[in-house]
Structures are given as C-alpha cells and as structure tokens.
Image: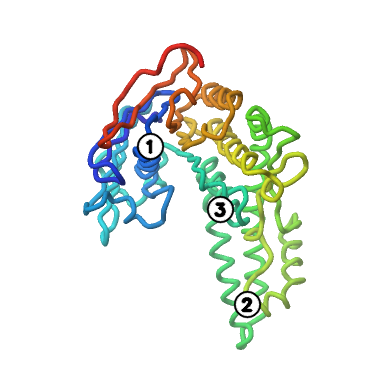
Amino acid sequence: MRVLSVSVRDFRCYEAAAAPLGGGLTVICGPNGAGKTNLLEALYFGCTGRSCRTVNDREVLRFGSRTARVVVAAEDDVGPHEFSVGFTPGEAKRMTHDGAPVERLVDLPSRPLVSVFLPERLDLVRGVPALRRAHLDQYVAALWPARAANRSAYAQTLAQRNALLARLDHGGSRATLDAWDERLAAAALALMEDRAQASSELAVAFAEIAAALGLEADPEVFYRPRSQAGSIEEFQAELRQRLSSDLERGFTEHGPHRDDLVLRHGGRQLRTYGSQGQQRLGLLALLLAERRVISRYRAAAPLVLLDDVMSELDRDRRHALVKVLLNDGGQALITTTDEEHVPFVEGSDIALVAVGEGSVLIPQAPAGGVR
C-alpha cells in the first residue's frame, strides 16, 4: 500500500489544501507555525480515524468551522483506494473506505499502517510503563493482527476477576475465584508469549539502528514480564501467593498488566539515566526498528511520520537517519524548517513539499547535489 496524497478541509490551520507524497522520503519544509505538524497529523487522522496529538477531536477543527474532513488517496497491487474521515462535534465520525462507510479504519486489513515520531512522544521512553505496554501491544497487533484478540481476552478476564475480588468480602465464592484464576492464567500466558516474541524480533533491528544513529554502548530493547510463570499452574500459584494483598486492595496486582518494555544503553535504562538527546535517539530507533520488522510480515512497511526530528541531530546523525529511511524502503515524511537539514542523495527517491503562507502547499523538486 502506497499513500499518494492527503487532502484536508477545515483541519487545524488549513481551510483547503492537498499535498502529494513521494514513493520514498518526502520532506515537508516551511517556517515555524506554517502547519507542517498539522499536515502529519492529518495523514495520521486519515489513516486511523484519530489524532496523534490530542484525544479531543474538537481541536482539529479550523477556528470558526463546523466540520473537518481528511481524504487519503492510496494504491496497491489491486488499484487505487481512498480513505476519508469527517468530523463534526456532537456527531459520530464519518469514515469511509473506497466510498463505503466503515465503523473503524484501524480494523481494515488494507489500510496504510502508520507510525509517528513527535517530540512529545518522548514520554514513551521516559514515562510510566503503561505507555510502553500499550505501545508494545499495538506493535504486536501490527505484526499479527489476529493476536490483538489475546490482549482483549486478558483485559476482559482481568476485569471479571477484579469484580469478583470486590464481591468476596460480601460472600463471594472462592471456588468461582479459582475458575477465574485459571482463565486469567491462560490469557496471561498467551499475551506474554506474544509480547516476548515481538520483542525478540525487535532486538536486533533496534540495536543496529540505534548504533547507526549514534546511540552507542550496546543499545538494547527487551520485554520485562512481571510473572515468571511458564505454565497455567505456575501462574495460578503466583496469584494464590498474592491473594491476601489482592483482597485488601480490591484488584489484581500481579500479571502482564504490570509488565514493561525496557530500553537501555551501556547497561542503564534510558528512562532514568539517558539524556534527552539519547532518549530521542532511543525513541527514533524503536519506531524505525518496529517498521523494519513489520515490513517482513506485512505487504508494505508502515508510513513513518517524523516531526522536527532533524533539529537536534548533528550532520552525521542526519545522514545516518536518511540512510536508514532510504535503505529500509517504504514511505517516510520529515518536517523541517530548513531543507538543508535533510541530506539529499543524488538518485534517491526524495521529494519536497513546501508549506507556504496562507496554508498553501506547493510541490517542489529537491535541490540538486549531495549535502
């Protein structure tokens, strides 16, 4: 699946605009405040049906407008495709695929996969484990869509066990709890296996890309489960050991809902000991490593959206980043205030789109030569 263009109406700062995408790397260039990040957000919105920057969809509306709409044009071996999302406050989103209404774009097996780097996403590296768990589960679902059901099954079973824990003080049955413990153990083991396998697939690509970007001293990423159980019986035993604590708290404290995805270099966690620059490189390497792995399992590599990634990279790391993007194939977008920040390699698939005043998108050819 290749994305050809994105068209927007009354989205953020844009009244009406359209931008073409190159088949490889597309550079979105323009001054601060011109709408570069808004364009990336629109692409994400059109591919997924939600924003990558806010949970409040009202924020995507251009000031004074009632309805926002994004249309993404794409093509695959079958032919052209169109994905559209319309949003009006107080109404359900109107999403279509090739003109036919759909409830959720993310459920479409043919939609373009998309990954996004935003400066505020550093919380994925330095924030709480819940953010990394959710991200890891999204990565699992991108690799093996059918396995998303394992995460849902665990969440539903955990909710049932927690509800039963709350009732035990009022005469609930311990025998019933044993039955739910067995179900929870089975769901937990399936989820942990998915996470462990996905993380193992990721490890080599992360180490290679992180080192290429300048995050040296043995960069690594690995899955850290809370449970050490290798069977349903062992997981049930872990739950029994913690039953008194669970009853006191009223919820299940132990299980894969407490796991973490750890990023390290030099034997130290980036979350705690990494500088902001190192954390940025770690996040960038994580997203690009996921993209490389997903491309082995899916028909196309995810479209990667990189916002303001060049401003804090030195010349060598900029060249390294562009080399990774071009060599791995697939499509990528980079925003920058200065096109000179993005190294151009003669003969490579790099396109330039300039964002000008008045929210006008002007297709251009990249400057010649090698920077």
Label 3: how many Cα within 10 Å (few below 14, some 14–19, many 20+): some
Residue 185 shown left or right of residue 90 in the figure = right
Closer-to-camera residue (287/237): 287
x 52%, y 58%: residue: 152
Sequence-wise, the earlier of marks 3 and 2 is 3
The quadrant in which residue 150 appears is bottom right
Per the image, label 1 sits on a secondary structure element best described as: helix
Q: Amino acid at mark 3?
A: Ala
Using the image, tell me which numbered label, if any, was put on residue 85. none
Residue 198 shown left or right of residue 239 in the figure = left
Q: Is residue 345 above or below residue 194?
A: above
Give residue 314's position: percent from left, percent from top. Answer: 59, 28
Give the CA separation, mark 1 to mark 3.
27 Å
Per the image, label 3 sits on a secondary structure element best described as: helix
- Which-is-in-front pick, marks 2 and 1? 1
Give the CA separation, mark 2 to mark 1.
47 Å
x 34%, y 55%: residue: 57
Label 2: how many Cα within 10 Å (few below 14, some 14–19, many 20+): some
Q: Is residue 145 above or below residue 54?
A: above
Give residue 189's position: percent from left, percent from top. Answer: 67, 55
Per the image, label 2 sits on a secondary structure element best described as: loop
Closer-to-camera residue (184/39): 39
- Which-is-in-front pick, marks 1 and 3? 1
Q: Are marks 1 and 3 in contact (CB under 8 Å)?
A: no
x 37%, y 45%: residue: 45
Q: Which residue is mark 2?
A: 250
Q: Amino acid at mark 1?
A: Lys
Q: Which residue is mark 3?
A: 134
Closer-to-camera residue (236/141): 141
Using the image, tell me which numbered label, if any, was put on residue 36. 1
x 74%, y 63%: residue: 233
Q: Is residue 272 above or below residue 317?
A: below
